[in-house]
Image (spheres, grey):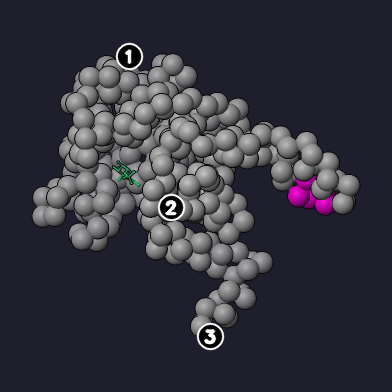
Amino acid sequence: MSNRGSIHKAVIPVAGLGTRFLPATKATPKEMLPVVDKPAIQYVVEEAVAAGIHDVLFVTGRNKDSLENHFDRSPNLERTLAERGDFEMQGKIAELADLAAMHYVRQGVPMGLGHAVSMAKEHVGSEPFAVLLGDDLVDASTPVLPDMFAAQQKFGGSILALMEVPADQIHLYGCAAVVETDTPDVVRVTQLVEKPAAGTAPSNLAVIGRYVIDPAIFGLLENLAPGRGGEIQLTDALAALIDTPADSGGGVHAVIFRGKRYDTGDKLSYLKSVVSIALDRDDLGPDLRAWLTSY
Ligand code: G1P
């Protein structure tokens, strides 16, 4: 049976070592680095919740305690804030534990994104699920998950989000060859390559870190040989889904994303994300803009 239905569960891989941000990430997970006044991972969870997800599975590794604490109640802090009369912040802090049902599974050894997703098999069960990568922040004003969920309802199978990038950037991403469908901005994926070498990319359409995936992926991930970088690549398993019959959960479509996305994956793009998000805020934007201009 082809699997079409509402998406209830999100899987968020957070087991990476964050080596690009050392020494900041020696004892702090990179997902907990602040983007203005929230840790990056909070934006990702809030995006999933805004799209109707009410069950989140984090695939974690060592040193992720602070992330678990962030999405848990903090009775002492809440009491202190209440005693000071700061009920607004007390509410915000308490709400973090109720955003969704949070679950955790450990990856054990970091063997790649595909391996991280394979850890979700038992929790996910038999329905299509969302995967959100913490390095990509999608601006709340231009969400992509609702369009992806609608595409999944219409076409079944798995749904990617693709963004046009300059040709000299495509080697940093998974890359898709596509054909049009009868739905504007929804395409059928015919080929997927993880981080193509310069000059070999089949298009300038980059896979961004939002996926709706059919559970048929789990069988494919189990039998997948290591790909680029010696890692079990999610992109390779998704490529195998292209050739899987629809009645076995195959077929891959994609939504073309034209909204605002921030990349917190390396130092320069992280700094740009912080500045862009702060500039958009009413409480900080005007003063920051004035200072940046004079600076
Ligand atoms: C991962 C995926 C890649 C995708 C990217 C989006 O790569 O493997 O296909 O384009 O996320 O951010 P990473 O950035 O983790 O190396």
- Give the mark nearer the N terminus: 3 vs 1: 1
Q: Distance between the residues labelled 2 and 3?
A: 31 Å
Q: Main secondary structure of the magenta part?
A: helix
Q: Position of residue 202 (x, y in %)?
A: 14, 48
> In the figure, is residue 67 to the left or right of 157?
right
Q: Residue at x 36, y 24 (%)?
A: 118
**Residue 171 located within the stretch drawn in magenta:** no
Camera-side mark, 3 or 1: 3
Q: In this view, does 133 lie above or below 271?
A: above
Instruction: Point out which mark residue 294 bears.
Output: 3
Q: Does the residue labelled 3 lie within 8 Å of ligand 1?
A: no
Q: Mark 1 points at which residue?
A: 1
Secondary structure of residue under mark 3: helix
At label 1, the amino acid type is: Met
Q: For residue 248, what is the image quadrant? A: top left
At label 3, the amino acid type is: Ser
Outermost residue, left side = 199
Q: Residue at x 58, y 29 (%)?
A: 102
Q: Name the residue under label 2.
A: 22
- Mark 1 is surrounded, within 10 Å at the Cα level, by few (under 14), some (14 to 19) or many (20 or more) other residues, namely few
CB under 8 Å between discs 2 and 3: no
Looking at this view, is 251 or 29 the one in front?
29
- Mark 3 is surrounded, within 10 Å at the Cα level, by few (under 14), some (14 to 19) or many (20 or more) other residues, namely few
Q: Is residue 7 visible?
A: no
Camera-side mark, 2 or 3: 2
Q: Which residue is drawn at 73% across and 37% down?
A: 74
Q: Residue at x 13, y 54 (%)?
A: 198
Q: How far apart are marks 2 and 1 (CA)?
A: 47 Å
Q: In this view, does 155 lie above or below 262?
A: above
Looking at this view, is 123 or 166 the one in front?
123
Secondary structure of residue under mark 2: loop
